[in-house]
Image (cartoon, rainbow, N blue to C red):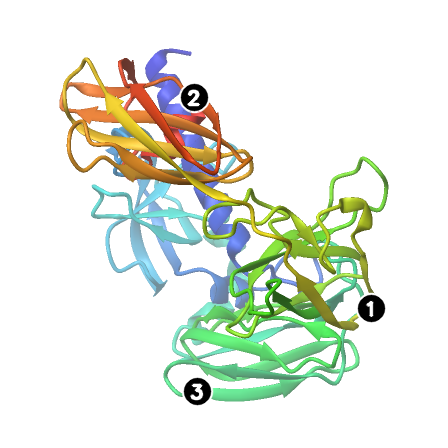
Amino acid sequence: MTTSDSRAHLSLCRVVATAATLMALAPTPRLLAQDGETTPCERYGTVPVTFVGVAGEPVRRWFRIAPDIGREQFLVTPMTITRNYRGADAPVLYLNLPGVVTLKPGRSYLVYGDNTTFGNAREIITLGAEPKDIEQAADELAFLDPASSNIFGTIHGTLMTDPSGESSSPGAPLSGVTIRFSSDTGFFAQATTDDRGQYTVSGIPEGRVWIEPLLPDGWLMSARSVQARSGGCTPFSPVARLNGRIRGRAVRQDGTPWTWLVDLVRVASRPGTRTARQESVRANEYGEFEFVGLQPGAYLVGVNLLRAPDAGAPYPPTYYPGTTNRDEAMTIVVGTGTLRGGIDVTLSTPMPNGRMDVRVLSTAGPGEAWVCVQTNGGGAGGYPVRQPGEAVTVAVVKGVTYGIVAHVDRPDGHFESDVVEVIGTSGRQVLTLRANTRVKPHPAGDTCHSAFAR
């Protein structure tokens, strides 16, 4: 394979991956036809482009699939539209993907697809299901001809439970649950799931529709939205997960509320295995916090369990009820959809703060300079150098290890220092960094993350 072929292949892979991602984000049809395929109503209700067209001779065209990627050549088939059911109101090119049926010039096909438009293309570039020869599409055309004049759509599906927390393995259906449907245009409707958890709502105007099940106590699902399409059926099968909760309050030693992040870590079921869940929530002005949607299991709650202390949160990892010793931490056991309240955390004594004055020098000459700082458990942050030779002051916490690097952008290139590790103290530290090593340019707005990723 030549270099140009390799680039084209990689770009094609990016296109295929993008299409796969878009399809994965779309609602997965659950109500299927007898043969295991989706129904014509579902296909028409889930894609933005549906038409019958005559295939022309395949041609190679140059497209820029993204602003930061050069032009690449792809094999496409021009389509002459004979029946436009939806979306084919501009010239259409069918993108020939590997493994998809090859269109025969002069033959008519029924095509479902996405109206992808690359940056420099004026045509609709369609990706989607394999086109169907018109002679094999009689049943679908019998549906599409009257459906294309219908201004309303249908949403249907099955409400399932997910007791395991893994959406790939739903549990039992939820019956007798009211589901509300609404849109920004003022549309409102509701339906109740039957004994199999199924629901259907018709007469829905085209556009974005919000779906909100009114779940029984102990279950949780945030409102979701789907795109309803006139004349079609939009399948959407929501999955409710167990709503175990941990609720409490975090305070400092003087009793004042802690109003920043509180962390939760699920205790591994077996020693040495990776924990399944880690997250943070922000406590309110009274120090109150709540974790929701928890599966049954044992959890640790505290402050700075997932990040290094910093000047704004100068506390060592502190576990409920208020210990810095992991062995003394109290685990919180959550049952099936249960609430554990009164989990009050008292922070430990704050660690002393200090300062570090960092000066940036570069034999390459002055430029836009940054001091990049990364802790041993957190992300990277940047401090701009306002004036050449001016020291940048970085607030530090005693005992915390920091990685520090200087970065200078100049018209003739980018330059960095070595990464220096410094342990914070309670006093004043002085550090001089020399950004003399030429490095590859970083993406816009990503100066410091790129510096530590090299």
Quadrant of the rendering where the N terminus is positioned:
top left
Q: Residue at the location (52% across, 63% down)?
A: 140
Whether label 2 touches label 1, CB < 8 Å: no
In this figure, which residue is indicated by the disc labeled 2?
420
Left or right of 94 on screen, residue 292: right
Q: Which mark is in front, 2 or 1? A: 2
User: Residue 315: image x %, image y %?
Assistant: 58, 49
Residue position marked by numbered label 3 in the rendering: 187
Crowding at mark 2 (Cα within 10 Å: few <14, some 14-19, many 20+): few
In the image, 386 versus 253, the foreground residue is 253
Expressed as whole percent of the image width and height from the top left, the position of residue 138 reads 52, 61
Which mark is first along the chain, 1 or 3?
3
Residue 158 coordinates in the image, percent (x, y): 69, 71
Residue 289: percent from left, percent from top:
61, 69
Instruction: Give me the C-alpha separation between circle 3 and circle 1.
Output: 36 Å
Q: Is residue 32 visible?
A: no
The image quadrant of residue 62 is: top left
Residue found at the very far front of the displayed protein? 427
**Along the line of sight, the residue nearer the viewer: 40 or 314:** 314
Between disc 3 and disc 1, the foreground one is 1
290 shown above or below 361: below
3 or 2: tag closer to the N-terminus: 3
Q: In this view, does 66 lie above or below 217?
A: above
Instruction: Give the spatial CA distance, label 2 vs label 1.
Output: 48 Å
Q: In which quarter of the image is residue 395?
A: top left
Q: Which residue is drawn at 81% across and 56% down?
A: 331
The kind of residue tagged 3 is: Phe
Determine which residue is flagged by label 1.
Answer: 336
| Residue under the point 36% across and 32% down | 372
